[in-house]
Amino acid sequence: MVLEHYIGELLYRYNCVAVPTFGAFLTQKTSARINDNTNTFFAPTKAIGFNQQLTSNDGLLVSHIAEAEKTSFETVLSGIEEIAKQWKTQLATEEKLDLQHIGLLWTNAEGKIQFQPSLEVNYLTSSFGLAPFNAIPVIREVLKEEIVAIEEKIPFMISPEQRESISFRPYLKYAAILLLALSTGLTGYRFYHNGLLNEEVVRQDAQNQVTKQIQEATFFNTSPLELPTVKVDAISIREKTITTAKHHIVAGAFRVKANADRKIVSLQNKGYNAAYYGANAYGLHMVTYDRSNNPQEALEALRAIKRSESSDAWLLSEK
């Protein structure tokens, strides 16, 4: 099992790929950039990071490998934990761990894992085929300096005879040129000002969209959920943490406990065996669609929920 190969496949589609008992690889979109020294343009990309504290199994990597290699969930999970153990041993002996197309990991003097991402692969699918390229620098300033130098060597002189023959017509030409320059400058400033206003409007709209998405996100919603008033027996909410099953299909995690209770009521009204799982390490109250001791049944139920209810559902497996 080449674990880094499967991690790379998932990094194209997801922003977080967790390796159980080892850590998680995170991605964040970065804008296009230019190297001023080499005049090289680089397309937008996904910057990869590593967090050694996110060691819980979210089921994403295990399910992907189990489906690709046509094997059981437990077998893949056992294999991943064995590879993670080997990686930890290698890092503990102060050896560097090179994961192909992902990055280089090593342990510093304080015992913390350091990570240097690989730049060989761009995991941002929208930038596919956009390779870096070098641009020829513009030399306008150099030409301007040469023209100024030529004007200094060839001074402009007018003899007395030419001054006497000058009529009022050249002044009209200079006035027309001045008016044209002022008109062009005002027009350019008007376009520039409108461009700034349009840019500010676009930036504000983007900020509003981001704020709206954050407020509506399943895992970080802090405002009370607006649901119809339904009379439900307190026992149906299942306040107690479910610990009898090993595999739980998670519907969401909420900072406000009241929101978690309302989510349970909503899912139970839809026919799901929803329940309150408990608070995780980050203080978020977790709600589940259903649970099972059979990993294959849990995977089938997860796929059905992703198709019919929510693509954000994920599988939490306990040891």
Image (tube, rainbow, N blue to C red):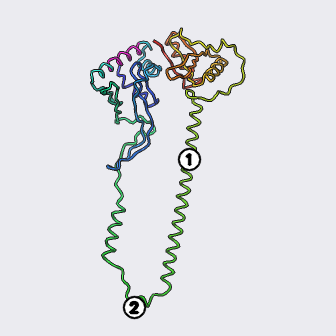
* Distance between mark 1 and mark 2 Cα atoms: 62 Å
Instruction: Write the start and end of the magenta stretch as one range.
Output: 75-87
Disc 1 designates what residue? 202
Quadrant location of residue 55?
Answer: top left
Compared with residue 201, is residue 108 higher up or lower down, i.e. above or below? above
Front one among 65 and 70: 65
Residue 176 shown left or right of residue 74 in the figure: right
Image location of residue 89, percent across then percent down:
30, 18
User: Which secondary structure, mark 1?
Assistant: helix
Quick one: label 1, few (<14), some, or many (20+) residues within 10 Å?
A: few
Q: Which quadrant is the N terminus positioned in?
A: top left
Mark 2: give few (<14), some (14-19) or many (20+) Cα within 10 Å: few
Q: Where's the C terminus, which quadrant?
A: top left
Provide residue 280's location: percent of width, then percent of height.
51, 20
Q: Amino acid at mark 2?
A: Glu
For image coordinates 38% across by 16% down, the residue present is 81
Residue 306 numbered mark, or none: none
- Circle 2 — which element? helix
Residue 276 vs residue 20: left or right? right
Kindly identify the amino acid type of the residue bearing the numbered disc 1.
Val
Q: Is residue 168 magenta?
A: no
Q: Identify the residue under disc 2.
A: 161
Residue at point 35%, 26% (across, down):
113
**Quarter assignment of residue 101:** top left
The one of 247 and 53 positioned closer to us in this rendering:
53
* Above or below, 283 relative to 238: below
State the residue at coordinates (55%, 42%).
206
Please check the rendered image and state whether residue 79 is part of the magenta-colored stretch, yes or no.
yes
The x and y percentages for residue 106 are 31, 27
Percent across and percent down for residue 141 are 36, 62
